[in-house]
Amino acid sequence: MNEWTVVQKWRSVLLLALCEVLALSLWFSATAVIPILKAEYGLNGFQASLFSSSVSIGFVLGTLISALLSLADRIPPKTFFAASVLTASLATVAIIFLNPLSPMVIVLRLITGICMAGIYPVGMKIVSTWAKRDTGLLVGLLVGALTLGTAAPHLLNLLDTSGLDWRLTLMASSGLAVGAVLLIPFVSFGSDIPKAPPFDPSLAFYAWQYKPLRFANFGYFGHMWELYAMWAWVGVFLFESFNLSHLANGRFYASLATFAAIAVGGFGSLAAGLAADRFGRTTVTILAMAISGTCAATVGLLFGGSPLLLVTVCLIWGVSVVADSAQFSTCIIELSPKNMIGTMLTIQTCIGFLISLATIHLIPEFIDLLSWKYAFAPLALGPLLGVVAMARLRQLPESVSLANGSR
């Protein structure tokens, strides 16, 4: 790769990462204002869950349609990306004209989720065209961008000084996303995208027929059991804990701590990407899940206690809970036929987010049954099963194709 190509590669990869940060700020834009809406409108636990899960439901629907029709491999990626972001941005800004308790808000969040099927998996497909023995790093960079985009609305909450209240966060997220639409045309591809296979819905089942892909997917599913439930509820958890410990300006510090706990995962994704390219994908994913699962099982024991100690554990959890995410996607890229990468990634994310729906809605039930002290503990089951799946993948001879032979 000559010097000009290297410059072009990193210009495109970093620009794509910026597009992902801007676009994915829409995902948790409404989730970030849940503490405010609970206080001002009496939002209950089920309604609060819907603010997050409706996006995941939409994402599942969008990825299911995309996978069955092979849209990620048939529509020009930048066109698919831009159209999806613009639609999601319009759906998000429309919420500010509605009562937050209106069912129409959930419909708009559902539309936002459907559009995400044209953003996250498509971004990974684009970045894979630049991969040259550094797939883990590149996908880690993209997942780091997703993580920062997810955290951004919690930071935007701190800008609420104009009296616009929760609407400012939604307006700002929508504005950021429009920036992604304007920038994506300037992203270039590192190699030609293979022609998509003829339309055949049965190709979606290849992910289960090929054993290495099956174990890689099972590892991802265990990871997803934990990830989005943590992201969706850690803000409320911190807000309630700070109130119980009588921390002054609890809402401000809860928003700041939530942003930090989620955003720090971006650095975890980058570090894990570098480590996985050198030491192996299964090694990194097993270690990350062991740490995050331990945090999930124990973080509630600090509820209502020292804010500093609680935030420290949440930061460790935030780093580890998403550090492995990119490596599961990278496994799919390295194990799939080149002309099916988009569809295989879409199938993986579709089922993973379907699983995340369960835990997002289960957390309020766990709070009622177990209290905040143990509400996150059941999330540790996902990483435990994920560790088993990745250990099985490591034993297969096909795993030599992972991480340039490091497995």
Image (cartoon, grey):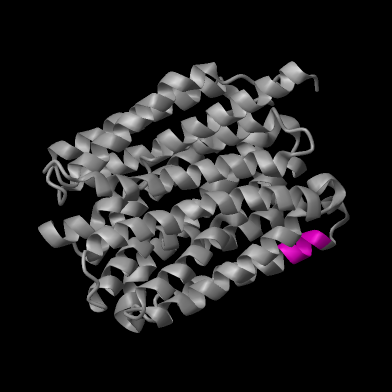
Principal SS element in the magenta part?
helix
The residue that appears at 72% across and 62% down in the rendered structure is 390
The residue that appears at 79% across and 50% down in the rendered structure is 278
Q: Is residue 388 visible?
A: yes
Residue 346: image location, x then y, percent: 57, 40
Q: Is residue 118 visible?
A: no
In the image, 336 versus 270, the foreground residue is: 270
The residue that appears at 37% across and 31% down in the rendered structure is 177
Quarter holding the N terminus is top right
Residue 361: image location, x then y, percent: 36, 64
The residue that appears at 71% across and 19% down in the rendered structure is 192
Residues rendered magenta in the picture: 390-394
In the image, 208 versus 248, the foreground residue is: 248
Residue 391 belongs to the span the image colors magenta: yes
In the image, 274: left or right of 30? right
Q: Is residue 305 above or below residue 384?
A: below
Instruction: Count the numbered circles shown.
Output: 0
Q: Is residue 86 above or below residue 353?
A: above
Residue 398: image location, x then y, percent: 85, 51
Residue 130 belongs to the span the image colors magenta: no
In the image, 96 versus 196, the foreground residue is: 96
Q: Is residue 292 above or below residue 51?
A: below
In the image, 382: left or right of 328? left
